[in-house]
Image: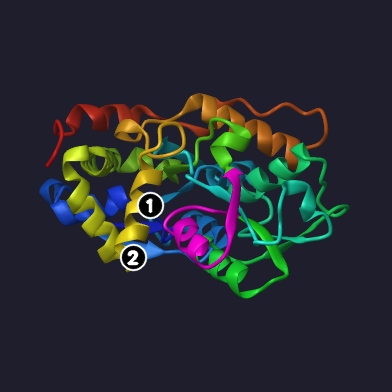
Amino acid sequence: MKLRVNIFNTSSNLPLFAALARGYFARRGLEIEVLKTPNSDELRAGLAAGRFEIAHAAVDNAVALADAGHEVVIVCGGDAGMNDFMVRPEIGRIEDLRGKLLAVDAPNTAYALAAKKILKNHGLIEGRDYALRLAGGTGPRSAAMVADPALAAGMINPPFSCIVRQQGLKSLGTQFSLLGEYQATGAFVMRAWARARREALCAYLAAYVEGQRYVMDPANHDAVLALLMEKFGLATAVAQGTYEAMMVPGSGFVEDARFNMPGFLNVLAIRAEMEGPAGVPATAAGRYLDLEYHAAAIGMAAGSPN
């Protein structure tokens, strides 16, 4: 069976690439077509329109889709985002961003909301103290920050956070250190498709879990480094820095792509604070989730592929 999977071109998707390279999908009779999105808006619109079956991205995008009336469901986790709050070299502290531009993908989802929450925690409010500029997904956004001195800050994850450090940008802290637990990348699908294709979805998730296990196994360090270099065209030092970021407990990959419920509650709280009417609590988390598919996949997955 052929499945179309839409992703951002970031290292969060290394388990997917590993599962493809190791034949874990093929072993289950799945043919995977990987599509790469330039931004969150196109990813959300494409999933809702049926242009692909599975999306891997910050799960806040699924929340946005569900809140807009689409029957979308999150089926697994993956990582905590691995983001750094990156700034231009002349910015010494977050308060120095007053009057500056924040580079974002879409203004009302995921890492843009996290960045706005970080700024709010330091007394800066969008529209009053700073403005947004749309700059695309992490790759285009990081390149834009390097090229345009007006773009003073943005959330950047590896490998791009490692690359832009070499190009003069710096970090004022990780998202994890600034905001705590966060459920970032996960897989989400349309609910009707999941029900109709349960067997294929569970098989996909089992292969994905095996890919995550392979990437996280220290015994595979050299092979994972080589895969990073191949897929992203990285120099060895950048690949090693990316690998290290992926393995940091709390902010990197999560064992077996398990869903981080406390982190998701933080996602919903940030979304409610930054987007919802004042005083309205975060919506109950359960309406966005169906983790039964992932639980079944864990039972199907091989021990620790190598």
- Residue 202: x, y in percent? 26, 37
Q: In the rendered structure, does residue 291 fall within the stretch colored magenta?
A: no
Q: Is residue 96 visible?
A: yes
Q: Which residue is mark 1?
A: 242
15 shown above or below 261: below
Q: Amino acid at mark 2?
A: Leu
Q: Amino acid at mark 1?
A: Thr
Q: Residues within 10 Å of mark 1 (few under 14, many from 20)?
A: many
The residue that appears at 51% across and 54% down in the rendered structure is 48
Q: CA distance from mark 1 to mark 2?
A: 9 Å
Q: Are marks 1 and 2 in contact (CB under 8 Å)?
A: yes
Checking the image for residue 234, the label placed there is 2
Give the left or right position of residue 301, taking residue 260 as reference: left
Front-lying residue, 66 or 158? 158
**Magenta segment boundaries in residue numbering:** 155-173
Q: Secondary structure at mark 1?
A: helix
Q: Secondary structure at mark 2?
A: loop
Front-lying residue, 251 or 207? 251
Q: In the rendered structure, does residue 158 fall within the stretch colored magenta?
A: yes
The residue that appears at 85% across and 53% down in the rendered structure is 129
Q: Is residue 30 visible?
A: no
- Residue 216: x, y in percent? 27, 39
